[in-house]
Image (cartoon, rainbow, N blue to C red):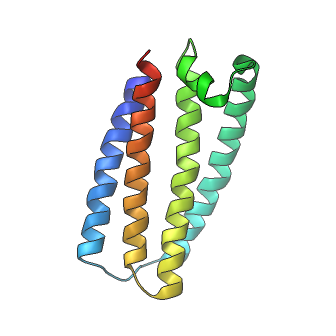
Amino acid sequence: AFVVALVLFTLGSLFALYEGWQKLVHPHELRSAGWAIGVLVVAGVFESAALRTAVREARALRGTHSWWQFVRHAKAPEIPVILLEDTGALLGLAIALLGIGLALLTGDPRWDAIGTLGIGALLFVLFAALLLTTAR
């Protein structure tokens, strides 16, 4: 699971950064924004439920440690990886909604590009956080 998460965060980051750059250099009008928003909202509901479950499971293992200490020093990496992935997914969904929302409000599709670049940066930060959890 850990290696898969690293690969997904790395490839996802590179792909989002590439897509964001392409959208910024060649902006185009959003198509099916209603569908995009609907999918993002539904995904947010599901990811929130997943994060709630992971937090509930981790709370019993965390003890008196802070969340970051728990993620850094957990004996089994599965729960911290899930916590980081679910938190990153919710942040990514929020960034995507913000980018699409601003693009619709302003009529400037570059906001969608900026949102995509933000998601790429977020995925890279999550990749780095995962690496830090293993550098003990």
Total residue callouts: 0
Compared with residue 106, is residue 65 higher up or lower down, i.e. above or below?
above
Q: Quadrant of residue 40?
A: bottom right
Residue 49 rendering spot, x and y as whole percentages:
70, 43
Residue placed at 42% from the left, 72% from the top? 112
Task: Reply above or below: 27 against 86.
Answer: below
Q: Name the side, left or right, on which 83 lies relative to 66.
A: left
- Say which quadrant the N terminus sits in: top left
Q: Quadrant of residue 62?
A: top right
Image position of 29 with respect to 120: above or below: below
Q: Residue at point 56% right, 31% down? A: 82
Q: Position of residue 116 (x, y in %)?
A: 39, 62
Question: Residue shown at 40%/19% (left/top)?
Answer: 135
Of residue 26 and residue 125, the one placed in the foreground of this image is: 125
Q: Nearer the viewer, residue 110 or 28?
A: 110
Measured as percent of width and height from the top left, residue 128 is found at 39, 35
Q: Quadrant of residue 84?
A: top right
